Image (spheres, rainbow, N blue to C red):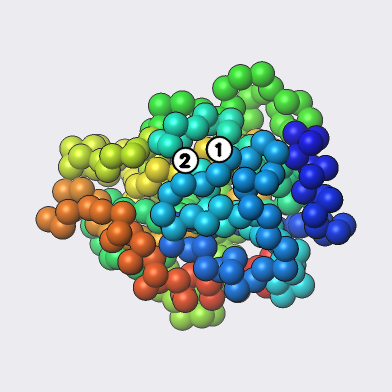
């Protein structure tokens, strides 16, 4: 970890980020617009290259509205064959760099039948159905305690802050529970029905490992999902990643406006 920190610090000229962002499928354009320094993952010791469409794979640093921000322009996923420790490693690095608040974004399928494609949903809680936990293994006491409390990963005051930001922008916002499965196959109709019974509003294949680790590290977490499609069984439309990218592209301007408003309000 020290090699990673030393390498990044050698590239950012004393820049100390206070806010971190992980930009999901189709949302990486935000980092193109606000980019002072960009480091490809392939150059950073300990990072792994992102290979999913819509994930550019760069660590981007920028000052936005007076806030010093570091952005992951694309993430790595458990379904790519990476370990949980590998995909959450950047979150630990953000913590070591000084990040106190982490904004997580993703594209997600609607489990809640009242949600529509291109809706934005503030995550209020999550269900980890990935079959594992990113904190398994030896504990790093410098980051967090062995058995961290998970009763309020997505801080209620930050949920309210994000909601008020959406109101100021006249953005209709959804709130709900995010259900994470391992992927890469989309869920079956029966699995989506199970997720609904369990209390889920949206489903995806990311975010939860990062949220668990960020909370463990003592970071404040804000989660925003872009509803890209109706989940399996909710509609008769066949699911595809191209649909995900197309829908998030339609929502990107509202997403960018909301994130900027949240950054101002933090």
Q: Is residue 110 visible?
A: no
Q: Residue at x 12, y 55 (%)?
A: 236
* Residue 143 sits in quarter: top right
User: Please, is residue 211 above or below residue 138 in the view?
Assistant: below
Outermost front residue: 43
| Residue 191, percent from left and from top | 23, 37
Relative to 86, is 240 on the left or the right? left
SS for callout 1: helix
As drawn, the label of residue 124 is none
| Residue 145, percent from left and from top | 71, 27
Outermost right residue: 14
Looking at the image, is mark 2 or mark 1 earlier in the sequence?
Answer: 2
Task: For the C terminus, give its image quadrant.
Answer: bottom right
Q: Residue at x 79, y 36 (%)?
A: 3
Q: Is residue 173 visible?
A: yes
According to the image, label 1 marks what residue? 87
How many callouts does the rendering have? Answer: 2
- Near mark 1 (Cα within 10 A), the count class, few <14, some 14-19 or many ≥20, is many
As drawn, the label of residue 77 is 2
Which residue is more in the foreground, 180 or 33?
33
Q: Residue at x 28, y 65 (%)?
A: 116
* Residue 179 sits in quarter: top left
Relative to 127, is 213 on the left or the right? right
Give me the C-alpha separation between circle 2 and circle 1: 6 Å
| Residue 37, percent from left and from top | 72, 63
User: Please, is residue 251 above or below residue 96 in the view?
Assistant: below
| Residue 219, percent from left and from top | 68, 46
Question: Dots 2 and 1: beta carbons under 8 Å?
Answer: yes
């Amino acid at each position: 970890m020290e090699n990673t920190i030393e390498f990044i610090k050698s590239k950012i000229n004393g820049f100390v980020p206070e806010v971190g962002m992980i930009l999901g499928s189709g949302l990486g354009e935000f980092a193109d617009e606000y980019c002072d320094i960009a480091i490809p993952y392939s150059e950073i010791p300990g990072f792994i290259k992102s290979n999913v469409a819509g994930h550019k794979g760069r660590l981007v640093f920028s000052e936005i509205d007076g806030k010093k921000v570091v952005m992951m322009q694309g993430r790595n996923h458990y379904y790519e064959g990476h370990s949980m420790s590998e995909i959450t490693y950047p979150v630990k690095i953000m913590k070591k760099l000084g990040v106190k608040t982490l904004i997580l974004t993703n594209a997600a399928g609607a489990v809640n039948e009242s949600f529509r494609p291109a809706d934005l949903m503030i995550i209020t809680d999550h269900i980890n159905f990935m079959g594992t936990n990113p904190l398994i293994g030896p504990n790093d006491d410098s980051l967090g305690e062995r058995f961290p409390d998970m009763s309020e990963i997505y801080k209620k005051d930050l949920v309210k802050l994000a909601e008020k930001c959406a109101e100021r922008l006249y953005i209709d916002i959804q709130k709900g529970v995010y259900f994470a499965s391992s992927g890469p196959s989309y869920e079956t109709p029966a699995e989506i029905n199970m997720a609904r019974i369990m209390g889920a509003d949206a489903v995806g294949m990311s975010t939860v490992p990062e949220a668990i680790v960020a909370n463990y590290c003592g970071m404040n977490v804000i989660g925003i999902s872009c509803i890209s499609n109706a989940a399996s069984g909710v509609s008769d439309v066949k699911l595809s990643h191209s649909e995900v990218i197309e829908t998030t592209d339609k929502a990107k301007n509202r997403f960018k406006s909301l994130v900027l408003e949240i950054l101002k309000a933090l």
